[in-house]
Image (cartoon, rainbow, N blue to C red):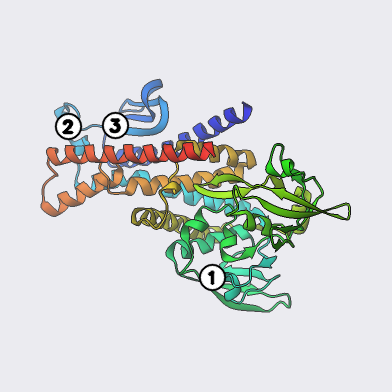
Amino acid sequence: MLSIFFTIISFLIAIGILVAIHEFGHFWVARKLGVKVLRFSIGMGKPLWKKKFGKDDTEFVLAIFPIGGYVSMLNEQEGEVDKSELHRAFNRQAIWRRSLIVLAGPAFNFLFAFVAYWLIAVWGVMGPKAVISQLEPGSIAAQAGLERNMEIVSVEGWHTPTWSAVFQEILPGVVGSSRVNMKAKDSAGITRDYVLDLSELNVDRVMRHPRPFDALGIYLADLPAVVGKVVEASPAQKAGMQQGDQLISLGEKKINHWSQIGRYLEDKANKKIKLIVKRNGELIDLTITPREVIYDGRKFGQIGIAPDPELITSTSEYVNNQYGPVDAIGYSLHRTWVVSYVTLRAVGLIVTGEMSLTNISGPVTIAVVAGKSASIGLVQFILFLALVSISLGILNLLPIPVLDGGHFFYYIVEAIKGSPVSETVEAIGQRIGILLLVMLMILAFYNDIVRLAA
């Protein structure tokens, strides 16, 4: 019950911050351009709190439904305007002024992400050093010439001290199905150039995989396959597995390290398999049926065991990925661009059918991730906010009526034809936009429910 409460609070804080930033962009630019702002609302529906401030008596509101918000400006299309204030009405502004106001919301989302990434870069993030523990023979990484114990020094010219940094720099290549250039240092200290060919990589598999580096054939931690924990009522417990057991084989596959277990079980859900464990020096034959779990819309087999957490820490060298205040500016701009590109590219892949619709997440999934990131610490929560802020910015820039991008599209049409879009066309567009958003929300909620059920 406490964890659910924490998740809800984390979600409300996250949404409140992101909505406030987005709407403040509209508010601030409108005020700077002399447009009168009537109301600034965080949330939709019935006001829980409201108060007027400033020379224009702008009403600031906290409303009952936290998802969304709005800035209401003086506008002849929405009510009668006194002649003395016509020059401050939104609809009376030049096209470039209206465009700046509607684009300011998404712009502030990107600005927030940049500031967040800068703060994190200066603070530093600890993570496992980017050293390859194991390679899958014939994999993408192996074909590129990478070898065990190599340290990945940089990807596409960007320093990558941790595996998190490596994944961040590889992602554009993953969604772009392109080649990725990297430098890796061998055990003798010699650094060479390598190229990962990602043209045949299944994008969906990487984006929805709990261990994305598996798709490249890279294992991050060379842990011995010793059971540190057996989950209660799991297939492992029912089969008779115990803490301290060492897995020798699964089916016909010999097991040498922990990463092989998850890879083998991927397509073994609900299939009876034999396994051999070593317990107190004795080999024991067991039979197990992995249960089916769904991670981000993809099915996996799972038996309910985990490695020893102390063993994970002891076998991985942790380093701090940190930048100075000046260098952090370039890094933050780069990271904001990378996340924006990957997000926009993913939207394109979903539209063309190259990525599954199950990748679309709704408020429930966002709430769960908000709670998890907040429970890990402030750094992870800020990174989560930056990611969602960029997604919110991109979503609002899509040329869908009722969104900021839709309004901007109307202004482009107005500039080309020399007159505003007719009220009839605008009304039809608004209905279409609302329908599209409702359909998107239904799909997102459905995906959320499927994830929760799994």
Residue indicated by mark 3: 72
The type of residue carrying mark 2 is Glu
Residue indicated by mark 2: 76
The type of residue carrying mark 3 is Ser
- Label 1 Cα neighbours within 10 Å, binned few <14 / some 14-19 / many ≥20: few
Q: Name the front one of labels 2 and 1.
A: 1
- Give whichever of discs 3 and 1 has the lower sequence position: 3
x, y percentage for residue 276?
Answer: 77, 55
Residue 389 appears in which quarter of the rendering?
A: top left
Residue name at image x 35 percent, y 41 percent? 440
SS class, disc 1: loop
Residue name at image x 45 percent, y 41 percent? 447
Front-most of residues 381 and 257 = 257
Front-most of residues 98 and 293 = 293
| Left or right placement of residue 320 versus residue 102 in this view | right
The type of residue carrying mark 1 is Gly
x, y percentage for residue 146?
Answer: 63, 74
Residue indicated by mark 1: 157
x, y percentage for residue 299?
Answer: 54, 49
Tally of numbered tags: 3
| CA–CA distance in space, label 2 to label 3 | 12 Å
Front-most of residues 129 and 256 = 256
Q: Is residue 181 above or below residue 336?
A: below
